[in-house]
Image (cartoon, rainbow, N blue to C red):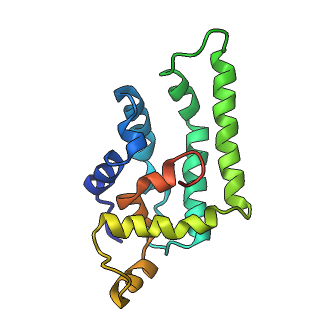
Amino acid sequence: MKNIDYFNLWDSLSRDEEYRALSQGAKEVVKRYVVMLPRLLEEMLDKPVTWENFAAARRAYINYCLENGFAQAWVGLEKLPMGVLPDAYVQALEASMHMAIKELDGNHDDRNKLDECRMAVLTDRQEHRGWGPEAVRKWRSLRIRDLVELNPSALVKMGRLH
């Protein structure tokens, strides 16, 4: 099993529009958690990108964030509206993270977005030119490591897939 190429991971993440729009402090918080992807998913990296494996990888990441203070770190960066208590905001953020996990277990249309996720990896790698046999073979052979390195946003965004 080859190691994750962190340059590819950071390069891909830095091209994500939502990530680019974050403040420097928020980017640092996200990085602290994203850097753990290869270790968290070590047993899954060479598994194919199926719905079950994708959902398990997202679930592992979100659970790691819940267990290791992501919500508290994020709330620490926010200027909260008058009257909003930090603990309430942490609870709301954690509730949305639990909802994201619940949606992974459900029968939602996120399953239909998995192909888009695979195509984003191929597009980033500039490996598909139409739908010839080689592009289809590569599309079907994508591994979780490809998502970690080349489309980490698909795994780390807390909401539904886009």
Quarter of the N terminus within the rendering: bottom left
Residue furthest toward the bottom? 133
Figure check: 135 above or below 3? below
Q: Is residue 125 left or right of residue 148?
A: left
Residue furthest toward the front? 130
Residue 127 x/y as whole percent:
29, 75
The answer to whether residue 145 of the structure is visible from this angle is no
Figure check: 159 above or below 90? below
Which of 159/76 is in front? 159
Q: How many circles with numbers are drawn on the protein?
A: 0
Query: Residue at left 56%, top 64%?
Result: 113
Which of 123/11 is in front? 123
Which of 40/52 is in front? 52
Figure quadrant of residue 58: bottom right
Residue 97 x/y as whole percent:
64, 42
Residue 144 x/y as whole percent:
46, 67
Figure check: 48 above or below 10? below
Figure quadrant of residue 131: bottom left
Residue 81 x/y as whole percent:
60, 14
The answer to whether residue 87 of the structure is visible from this angle is yes
Figure quadrant of residue 38: bottom left
Figure check: 132 above or below 147? below
Query: Residue at left 55%, top 24%?
Result: 75
Query: Residue at left 59%, top 46%?
Result: 159
Query: Residue at left 66%, top 63%?
Result: 109
